[in-house]
Image: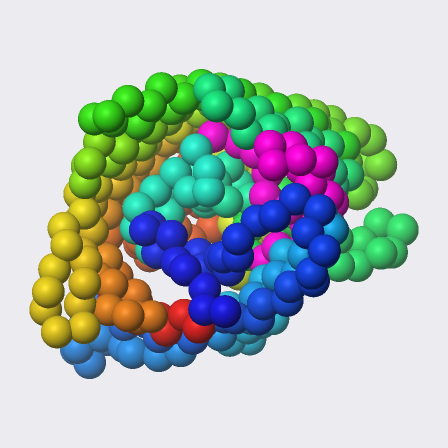
Amino acid sequence: MFYSKTWLGICFLMSTTSVYAQEKATVDIGGALRFNYNNSTWKDAQQKRGGDLGFDVFRLNAKAEYKGLKLNAEYRFYSESFGGAMLKQGWIAYDFNENDELQFGLTQVPFGITTYNSNSWFFSLNYYVGLEDDHDMGLKYTHQGEKWDYSLAFFKNAEELQFGNNSDVSNSRYSYDVASISNSDGNLILRNKEVNQLNGDLSYKINNTNAKHRLGVSAQYGGLYNIDTEEIGNHYALAAYYELKAGKFGVKAQIANYKYSPENPDGERDDVVAMTAYGAPYLVAAEASIYTLGLSYSIPLEWGPVSNVVIYNDFGYMDKAESSFESSMMNVTGAMFTAGNIYTYFDLAAGKNQPWLGSEWTNALAAGTPDADWEMRFNINVGYYF
């Protein structure tokens, strides 16, 4: 069976006809191969070359179902410098009925707009602080009703790849999690882990002939285990969101607030935490509010194999609680073209104090750079999904 891609086109999910307690086992294998071109204003040598084109990711997806028991897994292969091979998600589940499901394993955290609070290849600012498309290890119960949807979850920890007594969090991961970082002397500091996290999400749907609306709220609370002090701090996050789908037009709006309160050793900062993904950690403000707004419009086309284009604009603003920290912003204007099994993103991404959109990596989402300029990256991502 071929897979169908969501209209967002970011993540490819296998699709089968769901039958509760079905008697016949089904197994589907799929995946994707993607390539990426980018040209960034802060990279002088790259601009002289006219940008760079290279390998993005090869991934494999597996989905199985038998008598209400399901499997869903996605394994990704990036370059070694980008984190190498990693499991994005992997869970087993039981369907109690057509509306209620229990998942166990590395499953998506029910927080804010899901599956994505964005339209572009770059996601939104929430992703870069672990609040969009995050996946952790635990149990999640979901209910999808006619009007109300809700999820309740307990996560023992984030992806744990090293089971030592006081092992650090591995940098090889897809979604951002609290971790450790090296100081100027090369010593690891801010060594925290996410533990024993509770999540709840509740949304209400209003569907009529002209539009589909969704209003929701999310809450998250958990512990922060410090590897050096062996004491547990805490963290929380809250979100309120709204989604609209009216014909070809879409809206995604969200307000989120979070705070990390670690129990670090004396002398270590508590106004920042270290977070990591894709092989490289950076610092993030310990407390902030994030405001995002995404607009999209879908246009059917008949350009040879091209059948549709979605044009969009995603904006995000991060207001950090520490008054001396500079705010972070990003805006992505782009279009996603569908041509058979090929999905191509053309994005013009602009960022200010955003580590992936500027020369400052470690401190961009923490203290930032005073009077930072807007930096831009033109990006093309081409993927074949099978």
> How are the colours assigned in the image?
rainbow
Q: Residue at x 41, y 60 (%)?
A: 4
Tell me the chief SS of the magenta region. Answer: strand
What residue is drawn where x is 69% and y is 41%? 95
Which residues are drawn in magenta?
A: 88-112
Q: Residue at x 10, y 69 (%)?
A: 303
Residue 286 on the magenta segment: no
Q: Is 293 left, or right, of 270 in this rendering? A: left
**242 or 248: which is nearer to us?**
248
Asked if the stretch drawn in magenta spans residue 94, the answer is yes
Residue 281: % across, % down:
55, 53
Q: Position of residue 75 (x, y in %)?
A: 60, 66
Q: Is residue 341 left or right of residue 32?
A: left
Relative to the observer, which residue lies in front, 372 or 23? 23
The answer to whether residue 81 shows anywhere in this view is no
> For residue 46, what is the image quadrant?
bottom left
- Tally the marks: 0
Residue ID at (19%, 40%):
248
Going by the image, does 318 lie left or right of 202?
A: left
Q: Is residue 13 shown to the viewer in this render?
A: yes
Against 365, residue 99 (above or below) is: above
Q: In which quadrant of the rendered view does residue 39 lie? A: bottom left
Where does residue 273 sit, x and y in percent of width and height? 59, 38
- Spot occupied by residue 311 in the image (x, y as percentages of width and height): 17, 49
In this rendering, position of residue 73 left or right of residue 266: left
Q: Quadrant of the C terminus?
A: bottom left
Residue, far front: 23
